[in-house]
Each structure stands twice: as C-alpha cells, then as structure tokens.
Amino acid sequence: MAEIIFSLLSAPVSYAVGRIGHVFGGDINGPHHWIYGAVLIIAGASFWYDFWGLLAIFSGGGLFISDFKDFWDLKFYGIDEPGPKRFWGID
C-alpha cells in the first residue's frame, strides 16, 4: 500500500519538476519534456504490477501533463515561445 501511495505522490512532484524545467529552461533548444513523460508512461506500462512500473507511469504522467500544450501542438524539439512564464498551469 505504501508503494502505491509513494507512486501517486510522484505525479505532483514530477509535474513540479516539469514546470521548473519549463520556467528556467524554456529557452534551451532541445526536446520538450512531454516526450520524456510519454516514454516513462510506455515503459512503466510494461511493468504496471511492479513498484518501479507504477512509479514510471505516475512520474511520466506528471511530466506529460506539465507540458501538455506542447504535446497538443505536436512540438517535439525547440525553444518555448516567448511570453510570461507561469509555474502553475499548462503551457
């Protein structure tokens, strides 16, 4: 039970990590972090019955959601658009 709770708590932590990366590293020309989230979700789905699989699924979900707008616009690589950076939100 503790493993499930710890895995669930990893989602908001990875969301915060993704937002910090967006705010402070949005001007870096590189892959968008929704890609890392999708890879973690897919890798974790192979081991959904294990602690590490659940941790990968929920951590990947947090990263994926934090950069959902770039996924929606199918942005794979590049810098983020200039403008105000918000920590809480999806942009």
Image (cartoon, helix red, strand yellow):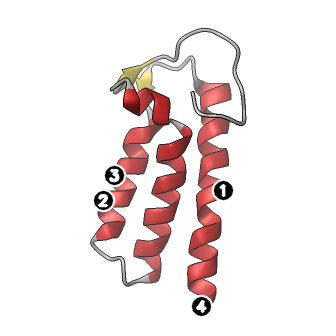
Rounded to the nearest angstrom, the CA distance separating label 3 from label 2 is 5 Å
Coordinates of residue 75 in the picture (x, y in percent): 36, 24
Mark 3 vs 1, N-terminal side: 1
Q: From this viewpoint, which residue is outermost toward the bottom?
A: 1
- Label 2 near label 3: C-beta < 8 Å? yes
Crowd band around label 2 with a 10 angstrom C-alpha radius: few (<14), some (14–19), many (20+): some
Name the residue that disc number 1 marks: 13
Identity, as a three-letter code, of the amino acid under mark 2: Ile
Name the residue that disc number 2 marks: 42
Identity, as a three-letter code, of the amino acid under mark 1: Val
Give the quarter of the image for residue 11.
bottom right
- Tag 4's secondary structure? loop
- Tag 2's secondary structure? helix
Identity, as a three-letter code, of the amino acid under mark 4: Met
Image quadrant occupied by the C terminus: top right
Name the residue that disc number 4 marks: 1
Coordinates of residue 44 in the picture (x, y in percent): 36, 67
Q: Residue 39 got which mark?
A: 3
- Label 4 near label 2: C-beta < 8 Å? no
- Label 1 near label 2: C-beta < 8 Å? no
Mark 2 vs 1, N-terminal side: 1
The residue positioned 37% from the left and 23% from the top of the image is 73
Crowd band around label 1 with a 10 angstrom C-alpha radius: few (<14), some (14–19), many (20+): some
Mark 2 vs 4, N-terminal side: 4
Coordinates of residue 19 in the picture (x, y in percent): 64, 37
Image quadrant occupied by the N terminus: bottom right
